[in-house]
Amino acid sequence: MNEAEIIDKLQQGNETAFRVLVENYRNMVVNTCFGLLHNTEDAEDVAQDVFIEVFRSVDKFRADSKISTWLYRIAVNRSLNFIRDNKKRKWFQPFDDVVKSKKEKLNQLPSAHAENPESELENSQRAQMLHDAIDSLPENQRVAFTLNKYEDMAYKDISEVMNLSVSSVESLIHRAKKNLQKKLYLCYKKKCI
């Protein structure tokens, strides 16, 4: 089935077309969500919400862009909403829970049978530091950077997803890289790891 057929059948409520859509785009949607959320379970939950929203709002799809662009937009928006909602929940979360979750993260050691547990731990700390730095970027920079680096999307495609000009996307990614350089340089200088 091509995109036009999938949309047409989806608008008629065809469940087979919905299954085809999910099979064709599931990995893309989950990867997009993961790039923003950095958590597999959360990414899968949000991806499920994305497909539910697609099923409910397919009659509003104007087909002036590709299905993938539409799905990227929904995935990015749902992921950002998830981040915002979690920040609100964390704000009201009791202090003891926050301390407990921090201790649990610190106690997550690499497996004893790993070839080099110290190196594995250091790599995991570096990955966490990178995720934290990306998460601290302004929203538009974070989205543009994530779509470009994690999803390997071209600037033109990102501009369609974000409803911005290509030059705006270039600027956002450039500023995101500069901000990440500063944050990571300061951390390495202070020997965060």
Image: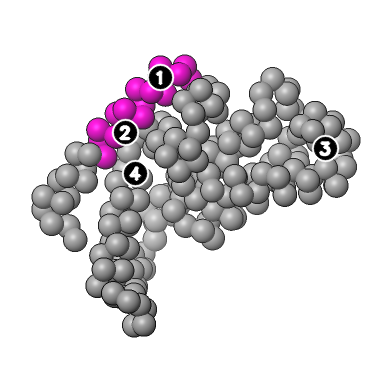
Nearer the camera: disc 4 or disc 3: 3
Residue at disc 3, secondary structure:
loop
Mark sitting earlier along the chain (1/3): 3
Q: Quadrant of the N terminus?
A: top right
Q: Residue 40's mark?
A: none
Mark sitting earlier along the chain (2/4): 4
| Residue at x 32% of width, y 38% of height | 137
Residue at disc 2, secondary structure:
helix
Q: CA distance from mark 2 to mark 1?
A: 12 Å
Q: Main secondary structure of the magenta part?
A: helix
Up-down: is 73 above or below 62? below
| Residue at x 21% of width, y 43% of height | 183
Q: Are marks 1 and 3 in contact (CB under 8 Å)?
A: no
**Residue beneath disc 2:** 176
Report crowding for label 1: few under 14, some 14 to 19, many 20 or more residues within 10 A (C-alpha): some
| Residue at x 40% of width, y 19% of height | 168
Nearest the camera: 107 or 3? 3
**Residue beneath disc 4:** 134
Residue at disc 4, secondary structure:
helix
Name the amino acid, label 2: Ala
Residue 82 visible, this orientation: no
Name the amino acid, label 1: Ser
Q: Residue 1's mark?
A: 3
Please tell me in which quadrant of the rendered image residue 57 appears: top right
Residue 113 visible, this orientation: yes
Image: magenta residue range = 164-180
